[in-house]
Amino acid sequence: MTDKTIFKKIIDREIPADIIYEDAHCLAFRDINPQAPTHVLVIPKKEIVSLDDLEDEDQAIMGPIMLAIRNIARQLNLDHGYRVVCNCGPEAGQEVPHLHFHILAGRALTWPPG
């Protein structure tokens, strides 16, 4: 990657975000265009374009990111359920070329998704 994505700029604190969680592996912040009453993005601090771009060594950060998602859900008291979404590629709706997970909650989420 040559140009910084908006997510890398958030990691580097070059642009503001409503950060709700951070650890050594990831950063979580509220989405600026929420699709549910609770809509949080969880991003790895390492620049990875998408799930397709994961390397074998990235398994060392993916487990902690999944546990961070669980911890964030607990922190936000999402006791009635939540959905975790990861779009991979433009046809799936990935708009930012930096791996990210959406935590959606606070309303009934229908299936199948749009």
Image: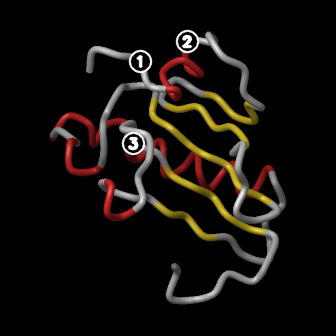
Q: Residue furthest left?
A: 56
Residue located beneath label 2 in the image: 12
Amino acid type, residue under disc 2 in the picture? Asp
Residue located beneath label 1 in the image: 4
Pointer 3 with pointer 2, Cβ within 8 A: no
Q: Nearer the viewer, mark 2 or mark 1?
A: 1
Q: Residues within 10 Å of mark 2 (few under 14, many from 20)?
A: few
Q: Residues within 10 Å of mark 1 (few under 14, many from 20)?
A: few
Instruction: Give the x, y percent position of residue 45.
Output: 46, 26
Q: Count all numbered tags in the image, as a single digit.
A: 3
Q: Nearer the viewer, residue 11 or 67?
A: 11
What distance separates the C-alpha of mark 2 from that of mark 1?
A: 10 Å
Quarter where residue 32 is shown: top right
Pointer 1 with pointer 3, Cβ within 8 A: no
Q: Nearer the viewer, mark 1 or mark 3?
A: 1
Residue under the image location 20 percent in, 34 percent down: 57
Residue 107: mark in rendering: none
